[in-house]
Amino acid sequence: MTQVFNFGAGPAMLPIPVMQKVQQEFLDYRGMGASIIEISHRSKDFDEVINQTDALLAELANIPDNYKILYVHGGAQMQFSAVPMNLIGRKAARKAAYVESGNFAKLAQKEAVRYGDVSVVASSEASNYDYIPEFRIESVGEDTSYIHITSNNTIYGTRWQQFPDTGEIPLVADMTSELLSRKIDISQFGIIFAGLQKNLGPAGLACVIIREDLLDYALPETPNLLNYKTYADKHSLANTNNTFAIYMMRLVLEWLKDQGGVDAIETQNEHKASILYNIIDNSEFYVGVAQTAHRSTMNVPFNLANDDLLGDFLEQALANGLYALKGHRNVGGARASIYNAMPVTGCEALAEFMQEFERTNS
Ligand SMILES: Cc1ncc(COP(=O)(O)O)c(C=O)c1O
């Protein structure tokens, strides 16, 4: 097999040692003569898996004791419904404020509109989301139940460099494309959610980190399996959960711990991103999408000054083992998603290819 460097935005590259471990344990999970994928979610072996996943996540993300970790069905977009259903009832006015910094922020806001009085308090839509719009807490009334942001905008390659202080109003963050890629002060947030498929494991499940005092506000019509309290009370096992995804998440977290944890991976992520941004900044052939001060370390979208060359660029990149570099349709061009599992050598290989392509096509 010739391994490619997978720059896809998600499902995304997973650490090779994790996939090797899955392969090695698949038929016979730690000598029990059965696979983890076929044993009960209520067995003691799975209990150990979920407990260890909790413990590792709490340790790596430095989660305070007054937060619960939940594993919730349906991926990240399901949380676009779950968040308002669980939290918009915190205040009688049923108000929520959304910062529109990208397509996923917009989808989240559109979903929330069904449940209350939802406003967009800042937006960068007019410039196709190439920066994080400025948010002013004064624009939000005290009767607001929560404020929603997308911490890293996967499509546009922007991220919040610093998070807003929202005082008593809970800050809710979609961290799907960056949880555990940099140090975050969890106590600044009421709820953090992330689909697993970038930095945490396979697609289809979301991890939710919620402050305990926010578990009691679900609207009466909230389905049981979208109610965060159900997950908190039943340790995410009210019904048969995606045990295999949780098992893989544990392996990814073990891998991250072996890498030196979030501190070490953050330093490496900054280095990886700088390898690509250096090429973009020192060239007129490539044009970065995001405004410099707002750039992400996880997603690096860029255009070719001559868009006619894009097809050749992508084709030759693939021939060189650089997979899934096509940009999202909302932006066009190319995008390198360089999550935790992307090694430095992957970014170096891409940088080398970009220079060579520029040399032969200028
Ligand atoms: C920031 C962000 N939010 C939400 C989603 C949607 O995730 P899902 O497909 O798990 O619903 C994505 C997917 O790429 C994302 O990048």
Image: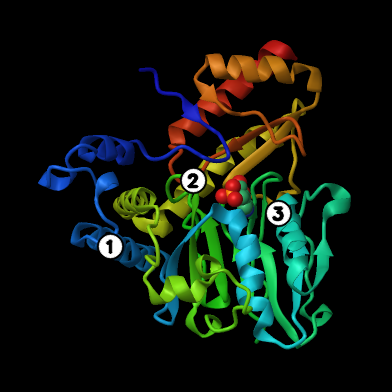
Q: Nearer the viewer, mark 1 or mark 2?
A: 2
The mark nearer the N terminus, 2 or 3, is 2
| Residue under pointer 2 | 203
Kindly identify the amino acid type of the residue bearing the numbered disc 1. Gln
The count of marks equals 3
Q: Is residue 277 visible?
A: yes
Query: Residue 296 location in percent, x, y?
Result: 63, 50
Q: Residue furthest right?
A: 126
Q: Is residue 183 left or right of residue 160?
A: left
Secondary structure of the residue carrying tag 1 is helix
Q: Is residue 104 left or right of residue 317?
A: right
Q: Is residue 161 visible?
A: no
Query: Residue 250 location in percent, x, y?
Result: 32, 54
Query: Residue 78 location in percent, x, y?
Result: 60, 57
| Residue under pointer 3 | 294
Asked if 361 appears above or below 51 in the picture, the reply is: above
- Disc 1: residue Cβ within 8 A of ligand 1's nearest atom: no
The mark nearer the N terminus, 3 or 1, is 1
Q: Quadrant of residue 176?
A: bottom right
Kindly identify the amino acid type of the residue bearing the numbered disc 3. His
The residue sitting at 75% across, 62% down in the picture is 109
Using the image as rendered, state which of residue 330 and residue 294 is in the foreground. 330
Quarter containing the C terminus: top right
Task: State if disc 3 and disc 2 touch (CB < 8 Å).
Answer: no
Asked if 202 appears above or below 52 in the picture, the reply is: above
Secondary structure of the residue carrying tag 2 is loop
The mark nearer the N terminus, 1 or 2, is 1
Mark 1 to mark 2 CA distance (whole Å): 20 Å
The residue sitting at 58% across, 28% down in the picture is 324
Using the image as rendered, state which of residue 42 and residue 70 is in the foreground. 42
Residue 52's label in the rendered image is: 1
- Disc 2: residue Cβ within 8 A of ligand 1's nearest atom: yes
